[in-house]
Amino acid sequence: MKSLYYLLSLFLFLSACSSVPITGRNQLLLSNESEEVAAGAASYQTFLSEAKISKDAVNSALVKKVGNKIAKISGFNYDWEFTLVENPEANAFCLPGGKVAVYTGILPYTKTEAGLATVMSHEIAHAMARHGAERASQAQILQLGLSVGDSTLTDNPNKDLILQGINVAGNVGIILPYSRKHESEADYMGLILMSKAGYNPNEAVSFWQRMSANSSGSKSSISNFLSTHPTDEKRIKDLQSHLQEALSYYNKK
Ligand SMILES: [Zn+2]
């Protein structure tokens, strides 16, 4: 097991460490940003070719307007794209490189332009912080740990149990908390982004309260977004705790 830790720490030491915009948190990324951006652009093209682009001119223009305002203050010189897609599911995403899609099914919850800015800035924050790449890197490290463990433990009778333990500990101890951490980081970054773009951050709290109020019914259309974006009390409390800072940016506009 000693060599496992040695190899892992050497690997971590040699890997590129970068920091998340706005929060400054250090993160470990094993992938190359330009490759992520290229993959994001390719996936977006595939997605759009299979999706139904919305013919709602008013809301499509609103998605582009809000997106461009956030992009402008983001400090990221991406080849941004913002598309409204006809889909009853309440969902939205931003692929690496600033490729954003908003589903029409989320509009009844966003309600206002600032509500839409809440969702879009949150998704854009995930992309700016390269959260997807960070989780992929963690999975790679876990995989490396398992394969090193596999070859080191050849003669150990408890090999399978030990490997299973590493896997469970890795998933529960590293990957899951990180995805929750990514959610609250995207909430915070999104709040700052929307405020800098001229949207009242109080509207973010109202949006999540609306989502929360609708999460208890049998509205299966929002279950997908909610499964990755639990609207618990903590999420709303955390957002409220950052309101003062966010308002200081909003009031400067
Ligand atoms: Zn999220």
Image: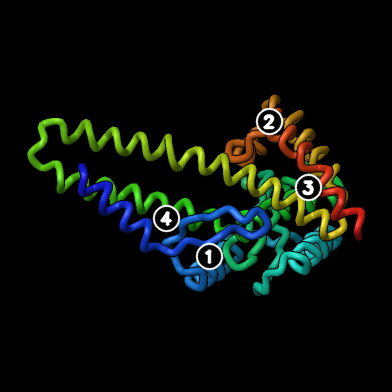
Q: CA distance from mark 2 to mark 4?
A: 27 Å
Q: Quadrant of the C terminus?
A: bottom right
Q: CA distance from mark 1 to mark 4?
A: 19 Å
- Asked whether 154 or 24 is in front, the reply is 24
Residue occupying image coordinates x 79% and y 51%: 116
Q: Residues within 10 Å of mark 1 (few under 14, many from 20)?
A: some
- What amino acid type should be assigned to the residue bearing mark 4? Ser
- What amino acid type should be assigned to the residue bearing mark 1? Ser
Residue topped by disc 3: 107
Q: Secondary structure at mark 2?
A: helix
Q: Residues within 10 Å of mark 3 (few under 14, many from 20)?
A: some
**Residue 137 numbered mark, or none:** 4
Q: CA distance from mark 3 to mark 4?
A: 33 Å
Residue topped by disc 1: 43
Q: Residues within 10 Å of mark 2 (few under 14, many from 20)?
A: few
Instruction: Give coordinates of residue 39: x percent, y percent.
Output: 50, 68
